[in-house]
C-alpha cells in the first residue's frame, strides 16, 4: 500500500549514484553507493510524507514499480500513521473527534500522527478501526535478499 518505486542510476562521469522517487519527484538525491541512496530516499520520503500530514493533505499511495525500479517500503509504524491520516482526510473526520472516541487528549492524538514519535501499534490499530479501516499484516519471503543464516 505504501511502497514507492524509485530509480537508482549510476553516472560513470561523476562516479555517483542518483536516486529519484517517481511518486514524489522532490525526493531525489546523489551518493556514492546504491545502498546509501536507498537509505537517503527512504528518509526523504518519510520527511515528505510528514509534511503532507502536517498540512493535512492526502498522502498518495505508491504506484507499481516497473522492471527498472526498486521499491522503498515505509516502516510499519509510518505506514499505519499514514493510513490513519489518509482515513481522516478522506472521511473529513476531525482529529479532535477521533481523540474523543479513543479517550485520549489532543496532544496524544497529534503524537499518534507524528511520524517522528514512537506510538503503540495497538493504539494505531484501534484508531484505524474506529475510522472505518481494518488492519492486516502480511509477511512475504523475499527471494532477492540474502537469508539470515
Image (cartoon, helix red, strand yellow):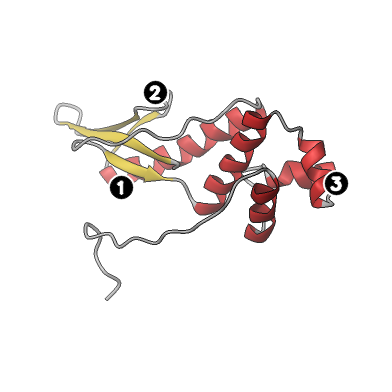
Q: In the image, is residue 34 above or below residue 90?
A: below
Q: Cβ–Cβ below 8 Å for labels 3 and 1? A: no
Residue 121 can be seen, yes or no: yes
- Of the two numbered discs 2 and 1 in the rendering, the one whose residue sits closer to the viewer: 2
Q: Residues within 10 Å of mark 3 (few under 14, many from 20)?
A: few
- Label 1 sits on a secondary structure element that is helix
Q: Residue 104: x, y in percent?
A: 83, 50
- Label 2 sits on a secondary structure element that is loop
The outermost residue toward the front is 132
Q: Quadrant of the N terminus?
A: top left
Q: Quadrant of the C terminus?
A: bottom left
Residue under label 3: 105
Q: Which mark is residue 35?
A: 1
Instruction: Indicate left or right for 25 with 111 as reference.
Output: left
The Cα atoms of the two marked residues, 3 and 1, are separated by 40 Å
> Residue at image x 66%, y 42%?
114
Label 2 vs 1, first from the N-terminus: 2
Label 3 vs 1, first from the N-terminus: 1
Q: Cβ–Cβ below 8 Å for labels 2 and 1? A: no
Q: Residue 39: x, y in percent?
A: 39, 45
The Cα atoms of the two marked residues, 2 and 1, are separated by 19 Å
Q: Residues within 10 Å of mark 2 (few under 14, many from 20)?
A: few
The outermost residue toward the bottom is 149
- Of the two numbered discs 3 and 2 in the rendering, the one whose residue sits closer to the viewer: 3
Q: Residue 15: x, y in percent?
A: 19, 33
Label 3 vs 2, first from the N-terminus: 2
Q: Determine which quarter of the picture holds residue 122.
A: bottom right
The Cα atoms of the two marked residues, 3 and 2, are separated by 36 Å
Instruction: Indicate left or right for 60 with 111 as reference.
Output: left
Residue under label 2: 25
Amino acid at each position: 500500500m505504501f511502497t514507492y518505486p524509485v530509480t537508482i542510476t549510476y553516472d560513470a562521469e561523476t562516479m555517483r549514484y542518483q536516486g529519484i522517487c517517481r511518486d514524489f519527484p522532490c525526493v531525489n538525491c546523489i551518493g556514492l553507493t546504491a545502498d546509501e541512496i536507498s537509505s537517503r530516499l527512504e528518509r526523504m520520503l518519510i520527511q515528505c510524507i510528514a509534511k503532507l500530514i502536517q498540512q493535512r493533505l492526502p498522502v498518495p499511495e505508491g504506484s507499481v514499480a516497473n522492471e527498472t525500479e526498486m521499491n522503498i517500503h515505509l516502516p510499519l509504524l509510518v505506514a499505519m500513521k499514514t493510513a490513519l491520516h489518509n482515513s481522516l482526510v478522506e472521511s473529513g473526520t476531525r482529529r479532535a473527534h477521533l481523540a474523543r472516541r479513543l479517550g485520549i487528549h489532543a496532544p496524544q492524538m497529534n503524537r499518534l500522527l507524528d511520524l517522528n514519535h514512537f506510538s503503540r501499534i495497538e493504539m494505531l490499530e484501534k484508531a484505524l478501526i474506529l475510522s472505518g479501516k481494518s488492519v492486516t499484516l502480511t509477511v512475504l519471503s523475499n527471494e532477492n535478499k540474502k537469508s539470515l543464516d
